[in-house]
Amino acid sequence: MSLQDYFSRGLSADPELERAITGEMRRQQDGIELIASENLVSRLVLEAQGSVLTNKTVEGLPYKRYYGGAEFADAVEALAVERATRLFGCRFANVQPHSGSNANAGTFLGLLKLGDTILSMDTAAGGHISHGHPATLTGRDYRIVRYGVSRQNERIDYDEVRALAFEHRPRMIVAGGSAYPRAIDFKVLRDIADAVDAYLLVDMAHFAGLVATGLHPHPFPHAHVVTTTTYKSLRGARGGLVLWNDEALSRRINGGIFPGVQGSVMLHIVAGKAASLGEALRPDFTTYNAAVVANARQLAEGLAAGGLRLVSGGTDIGLMLADLSPLGIRGDLAAHTLEAAGLAVNKNQIPFDPHPPEAPSGLRLSANAGTARGFGEAEFATIAQFIVDLLRAPEDTQLQSRIQSEVAALSARFPIYR
Ligand SMILES: *Cc1c(COP(=O)(O)O)cnc(C)c1O
């Protein structure tokens, strides 16, 4: 291959790979994405993530790099940091975490000592695995105590959190989960943290967009540190973010990320984060998030009207957890059935689930991606009806193909990346 080709040929030079990527593009264009950990980024974010910044290696923080030639790298990262702090109204940000899990692991490493106690939400109640699940490094390095939700209302039982905090004296309390549909009372948690001299870490991955636009209570000033992914409700590039206000924590948090759990910066991703944070600072991001909440309510109401039970009775954010037991179907079959009709969801355990993670009682759904392509409440009412019809007759393959065409037709009215 000539150098001319090397620097000019695109994806079409690799048909095998191109086929797979084009297939994924079609899947996203034609299907309806309801998986809560996904969203649809703008062309601008795609371009920034695919830029020549992938060639540049830097370590450390902007304007304090180990390697030279970092003038533009510094400009990119400083821009992302400045936008992140402006968006969330805080003093400091680290935009380097390669993922949400790394944001958490690095923050734990920076602020805690090996063997310290962390009080976090049980995965079975909706907590995230990166908050100390035994299968992760965080679960091995720290002593993990779990709080759950109340059996009565499936919401966090703050009295239980307080009792566990006094009993186990954690160094850190973690709030925020991957399948918890309700707003969290950060002030109560901070009071508990203060009473036992613990840090409060809020992981807002699933409601960061709402926080940024004032549609959800703000973790600051209550949290000592806030972590998030940037690609779920923030509708941005793929990675994580750490935010804080107390300068005394800066060296420890930054050092926890690098060299604690990561090496050099993925600058092309940081560029994508800068681009999406810039978008999030625009007024239309507020419009988007308001629509996410309204659409999620519409979807939830439609599912409830069709006989599904919503965990905790509904949702305050873009995400919801539906209990399928009234329909006598499990999450694995339900997810397959919906996928056959072009609707992407994920199976999920519900609190106190009598069934295993492989065949759980629930489904987790979100309005994030559908809203990003322009769906409104009418479309989400239709989607709820598709879901209810499909789950009532999971063996009906004719119904699946009929709804699949309707899904494709609906998606075609809201084109993406064309
Ligand atoms: C998705 C998620 C993460 C982890 O993100 P990764 O980028 O997959 O590592 C962490 N915390 C919460 C609450 C999440 O929902």
Image: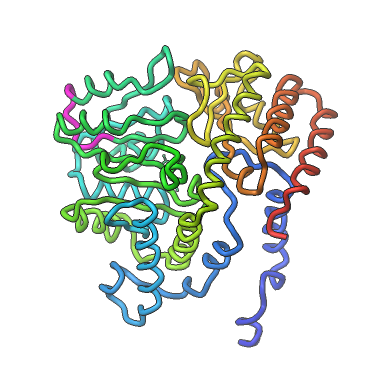
- In front of the other: 286 or 335: 286
Q: Is residue 169 magenta?
A: yes
Q: Is residue 237 visible?
A: no
In the rendered view, would you say 327 is above or below 320?
above
Q: Is residue 389 left or right of residue 298?
A: right
Q: What residue is at 74 percent from the left and 29 percent from the top?
A: 386
Q: Is residue 365 magenta?
A: no
Residue 150 position within the rendered picture, expressed as x and y whole percent measured from the top left: 38, 16
In the rendered view, would you say 112 is above or below 125?
below
- In front of the other: 103 or 296: 296
Q: What residue is at 36 percent from the left and 41 percent from the top?
A: 203
Quarter of the image for residue 171 reads top left
Residue 368 position within the rendered picture, expressed as x and y whole percent measured from the top left: 57, 42
Residue 71 position within the rendered picture, expressed as x and y whole percent measured from the top left: 36, 79
Q: What residue is at 45 percent from the left and 58 percent from the top?
A: 277
Q: Is residue 274 left or right of residue 258?
A: right
Q: Is residue 359 left or right of residue 121?
A: right
Quarter of the figure with the C terminus: bottom right
Find the magenta span and give its range: 166-173
Q: Looking at the image, how many numbered discs can be counted on the residues? A: 0
Residue 78 position within the rendered picture, expressed as x and y whole percent measured from the top left: 35, 68
